[in-house]
Image (cartoon, rainbow, N blue to C red):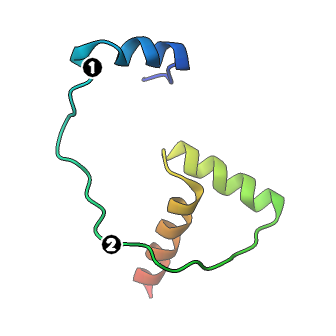
Amino acid sequence: MTRIMTPDEEYDFYKRPENQIPLGEPVVRMRRLTELFPVRFDARELAAISERAAADGRTASAWIRGACARELARV
């Protein structure tokens, strides 16, 4: 199991040149996000969304967009 590094450990890891080489292909954004759509959540929902997004290594916004995309694809 991989554990999360502390900020000091990350600094030490990435200051070494061998750990500064990108791996794989660069990520290319396929579309530009142009519209803002305000949505309100209660504190409990927002906490749950933030937790799940962090567990997936994503922002809350990206996690919500993914959930919406999955739901729209299902219909």
Closer to the camera in the image, 1 or 40: 40
Tell me if 26 is positioned left or right of 29 in this view: left
User: SS at mark 1?
Assistant: helix
Circle 2 packing at 10 Å, graded few (<14), some (14-19), many (20+), is few
Tell which of 71 and 65 is nearer to you.
65
> Type of residue at label 1?
Asn
**Residue 11, visible in the rendered structure:** yes
At a point 70% along the width and 75% down the height, the residue shown is 39
In the image, residue 12 above or below residue 44: above
What is the distance, in whole Å, between disc 1 and disc 2 at their CAs? 30 Å
Q: Position of residue 50 (x, y in %)?
A: 65, 51
Which of 24 and 73 lies nearest the eye of the viewer? 24
Above or below for 46 versus 71: above
* Residue that numbered label 1 is attached to: 19
Q: Residues within 10 Å of mark 1 (few under 14, many from 20)?
A: few
Q: Is residue 6 visible?
A: no
Along the line of sight, the residue nearer the viewer: 52 or 20: 20
Relative image position of residue 7 (x, y in whole percent): 54, 20
Q: Farthest residue in the right direction? A: 43
Secondary structure beneath label 2:
loop
Q: Residue at (68%, 77%) from the top-left corner?
A: 38
Disc 2 marks a residue whose amino acid type is Arg
Tell me whether circle 1 and circle 2 mark residues in contact (CB < 8 Å): no
Which mark is first along the chain, 2 or 1? 1
Residue extending farthest to the left is: 25
| Residue 31 tag number | 2
Picture coordinates of residue 40 (x, y %)?
75, 72
Q: Residue at x 65, y 57 (%)?
A: 49
In this view, the residue farthest toward the bottom is 75
The quarter of the picture where the N terminus appears is top left
